[in-house]
Amino acid sequence: MGAAQVGHVKDGLLNIMSKGTLAALTQARDAGRGDDMVSQMVDFYATRFKT
């Protein structure tokens, strides 16, 4: 699922879960990890939360 699919609009507003997911995907993309497999993404976020 890409960032475009995450930006689901309901009643004209992005819901809070979509915003969080979109922010997480944007961080991964900006770090050059946008094409990683899910298991690699989990490692990326685990490392980010440890800091």
Image (cartoon, rainbow, N blue to C red):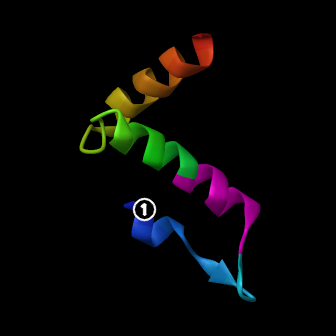
Q: Amino acid at mark 1?
A: Ala
Write down the quadrant of residue 9 in the picture: bottom right
Q: Report the magenta stretch's main SS.
A: helix
Q: Residue sitting at 75 percent across and 60 percent down?
A: 16
User: Is residue 47 depicted above or below 23 in this figure?
Assistant: above
- Nearer the observer, 25 or 37: 25
Q: Residue furthest bottom?
A: 11
Q: Is residue 46 left or right of residue 14?
A: left
Quadrant of the image for the N terminus? bottom left
Q: Residue furthest front?
A: 30
Q: Is residue 4 left or right of residue 51?
A: left
What residue does disc 1 label?
A: 3
- The percent position of residue 14, horizontal first and vertical second, equals 68, 72
Tag 1's secondary structure?
helix
Q: How many marks?
A: 1
Q: Is residue 38 left or right of residue 6?
A: left
- The percent position of residue 17, horizontal first and vertical second, equals 69, 58
- The percent position of residue 44, horizontal first and vertical second, equals 42, 24
User: Is residue 42 depicted above or below 11 in this figure?
Assistant: above
- The percent position of residue 28, horizontal first and vertical second, equals 40, 38
Q: Residue sitting at 36 percent across and 40 percent down?
A: 30
Q: Residues within 10 Å of mark 1 (few under 14, many from 20)?
A: some
Q: Residue furthest top?
A: 51
Q: Is residue 2 magenta?
A: no
Q: Is residue 9 left or right of residue 3?
A: right
Q: Is residue 20 magenta?
A: yes
Start-end of magenta stretch = 14-22
Q: Residue sitting at 64 percent across and 58 percent down?
A: 19
Quadrant of the image for the C terminus? top right
Q: Residue sitting at 61 percent across and 19 percent down?
A: 49
